[in-house]
């Protein structure tokens, strides 16, 4: 469905806004979520789940907000009010400004923040560089920290507001691969607990820790099947299941300070290397 030929849809910047029968926009009836890294891959699937749940969506990308085709279709089919925002979290201060930009564009601050944007590199203790450590920390922890600060301080109504951080199941049994990434996600897990305590009761803060979900070209089909058999549940999570868990936490008004593992049980076991090196 497009806005052309349908008087109920009006483009505003990059947004589709569904009007009521009188032509006004029922904004007060829609909760607003900001999904960082929300234009593609897991972030895009999370954004699509919020669209189907009736949310308005602010979609962040580091350098562009070109949508995955499936997400673009979902936004169109659901008549979702949405807009895109670019901010390179390599400069974490750009993250702190993002909340105000979203509030200005939509006329209200977000009710939900999903810190999904992340970078991922290959390094170990014997070859990691200071630049690797600082770059991963900036994007994967410092930017979410400053977003959390801005989210908490922006003037907002009295309704339920919450933050959901996307972690990684490896934080329970870290191995030596992707050291800078792992340390940054462990720091983000610490932020989850710290901010949940300090920001209550005004803001709830929780996390979802996925397992291997969207395979990169580093994996082959047979390897994925063998890895699934190595999980305690003998299966890997689907990206849609992770998105469902994020939606659950967004609506779970009595829950804060929790990390929900969606990983086929992987966090219960210790793996000596990253999954990309196993079951080959």
Image (spheres, rainbow, N blue to C red):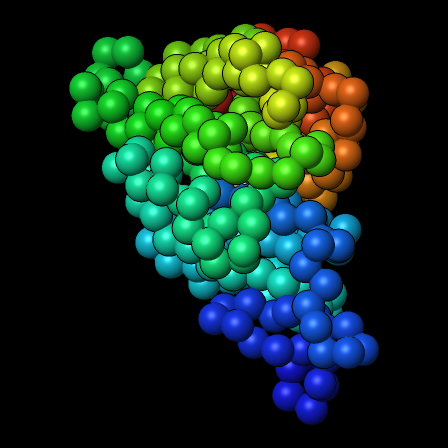
Is residue 173 found left or right of 218 in the rendered image? right
Of all residues, the one furthest to the left in this rendering is 130
Asked if 87 appears above or below 4 in the picture, the reply is above
Asked if 2 appears above or below 194 in the picture, the reply is below
Q: Position of residue 28 (x, y in %)?
A: 70, 54
Residue nearer the viewer, 64 or 3: 3
Q: Residue at x 77, y 26 (%)?
A: 253
Using the rendered image of the protein, determine whether residue 225 is visible from the camera's viewpoint. no
Q: Position of residue 213 (x, y in %)?
A: 61, 37
Residue nearer the viewer, 215 or 159: 159
Asked if 248 appears above or below 110 in the picture, the reply is above
Q: Residue at x 59, y 10 (%)?
A: 197
Q: Position of residue 256 (x, y in %)?
A: 68, 18
Residue nearer the viewer, 183 or 253: 253
Q: Position of residue 39 (x, y in %)?
A: 51, 54
The quarter of the displayed image where residue 27 is located: bottom right
Is residue 274 found left or right of 30 in the rendered image? left
Is residue 218 found left or right of 77 in the rendered image? left
Of all residues, the one furthest to the bottom in this rendering is 5
Q: Residue at x 19, y 20 (%)?
A: 129
């Amino acid at each position: 469905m497009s806005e052309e030929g349908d008087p109920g849809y009006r483009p505003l910047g990059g947004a589709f806004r569904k009007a009521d029968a009188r032509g006004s926009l029922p904004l007060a009836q829609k909760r607003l979520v900001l999904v960082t890294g929300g234009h593609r891959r897991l972030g895009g699937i999370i954004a699509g789940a919020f669209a189907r749940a009736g949310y308005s969506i602010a979609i962040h990308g580091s350098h562009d907000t070109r949508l995955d085709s499936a997400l673009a279709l979902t936004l169109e089919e659901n008549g979702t009010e949405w807009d895109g925002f670019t901010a390179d979290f390599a400069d974490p201060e750009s993250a702190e400004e993002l909340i105000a930009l979203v509030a200005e564009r939509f006329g209200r601050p977000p009710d939900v923040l999903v810190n999904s944007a992340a970078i991922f590199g290959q390094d170990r203790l014997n070859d990691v560089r200071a630049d690797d450590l600082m770059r991963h920390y900036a994007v994967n922890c410092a930017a979410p920290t400053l977003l959390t600060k801005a989210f908490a301080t922006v003037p907002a109504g009295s309704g339920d507001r919450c933050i959901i951080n996307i972690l990684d199941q490896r934080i329970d049994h870290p191995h030596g691969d992707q050291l800078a990434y792992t340390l940054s996600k462990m720091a983000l897990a610490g932020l989850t607990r710290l901010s949940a305590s300090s920001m209550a009761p005004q803001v709830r803060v929780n996390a979802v820790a996925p397992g291997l979900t969207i395979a990169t070209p580093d994996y082959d089909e047979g390897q994925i099947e063998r890895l699934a058999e190595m999980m305690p549940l003998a299966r890997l999570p689907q990206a849609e299941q992770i998105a469902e868990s994020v939606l659950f936490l967004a609506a779970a008004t009595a829950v804060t300070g929790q990390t929900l593992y969606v990983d086929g049980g992987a966090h219960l076991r210790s793996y000596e290397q990253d999954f990309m090196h196993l079951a080959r």
